[in-house]
Amino acid sequence: MFGEDSFRDDSELDTATFLQKLRAARELPKTAAPPPALFTPFFKRFLDEGQSIICLHPSADVSGTVRSATGAAQDFPGADIRVIDTRSIAGPLAAMVLEAHAWAQQGRAAGEVERRVREMMGRQMIYFLVDTLDYLQKGGRIGGAQALVGGLLQVKPILTLRDGRVEAFEQQRTKKRAMARLVELVATLKPAQRGLPLVRDACRCPRGCGSHGGGPGSRTGHPGNPDL
Amino acid sequence: MAADLAAAQGIQEIPIYELPPAIVVHGGPGVLAVGFFRSAI
C-alpha cells in the first residue's frame, strides 16, 4: 500500500513499477496479508470437489497470512484444511509449495504430503543480504537483528531466518565480500545436491513480477523429488 | 554469485527468481537471498 493506494503484488504491481514507486515514495509503503475472504472461494471449491487442502504460508512471525487462512478455515468446520506455518519465506517456501503440489499430483495422501513438507521445513536455510537495515527496521520485521541498527554504517549485514524470525547472522565490509561469504556458507552447510539452492534478487529485475514464466517450478527441474 | 555457487556445488544451473514486492518492501532495494535445503541425514 502506497498511501491510500493498494495493489495486489501477484497481479496489480510489477516489480519495475514497484521499485520506481518505492524510491519515489515519501513514506515507506505498507504490506497487508491477504484477507480471509480471498481464501474462502478456493477452500469452498476444493472442498466441494472432495479434496483435502494443505495451505503453506510464510512464517507467522513476518506475515499475517497464516492468521488469515486459519480464519477462513474456521468457516468450514470439520473440513480437512491443513494450514501450515512453514517458518520460511521466499525460495524455500516456494520450493515446498512446488514439491507438495508434485506429491499431491502423484496421488500421495494429504497426511503424507504434510509429513514430507514438515520434514523439509526442518532442513530449510535462507540467508539475506540487504543494502540497508532501514527498511526492515521501519517495517518492524527486524526481530533479533535489531541490535545491529545504529552500529552499522558501511557494513553489509547478512541476515537469516531462525525459527521464522529475522535474525542477524554476521556482517561483512562490502557487498562483494558478503556475497562471497554466502557462497562459503552454502558450501559449509551441504545443501541437498538434487534440490535447490535458490538465489533470489529483487532489484535487478528487468521484467515485471508477473513475468515469472512458468513460476519457480518450471526451473527447479526436480518435481516431486523425495530426497529434496 | 550464481555461477560461483554452481561451481562450488557442482550444479549446472542455479535458479534465480525475483522477490515479490511484499518482501522488497521490508528488505529494501538491493535485497538478495540464498535459500536451500540441507541434505537429509
Image (cartoon, helix red, strand yellow):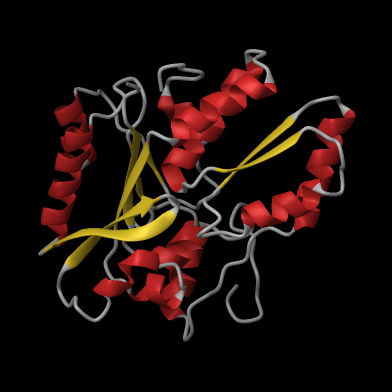
Location of the C terminus of chain A (image quadrant): top left
Question: In terms of image quadrants, where is residue A106?
Answer: top right
Q: Is residue B9 above or below residue A69?
A: above
Percent x, y of residue B1: 20, 43
Q: Residue A54: tell me if it is visible.
A: yes
Q: Is B18 in front, or is A65?
A: A65
Q: Is residue A147 left or right of residue A108?
A: left
Residue drawn 71% across the image and 50% down it: A69
Residue extending furthest bottom? A26
Instruction: Identify the residue at horizontal 26%, vertical 67% (top origin).
Output: A131
Is A214 located above or below residue A29 in the figure?
Answer: above
Give the quarter of the image for residue A8: bottom right
Q: Quadrant of residue A100?
A: top right
Work out which quarter of the rendered image holds the N terminus of chain A and state it. bottom right
Taking the spot 51% from the left edge, 59% from the top edge, the residue there is: A61
Q: How many marks?
A: 0
Tell me: A5 left or right of B3: right
Tell me residue A123's x, y (percent): 38, 33
> Can I make out residue A101 in this image?
no
What is the x, y in percent for residue A158?
A: 24, 58
Q: Is residue A182 above or below residue B15?
A: below
Q: Is residue A33 left or right of residue B15?
A: right
- Say which residue appears at 87% left-offset and 48% top-offset: A75
The front one of A211 and A57 is A57
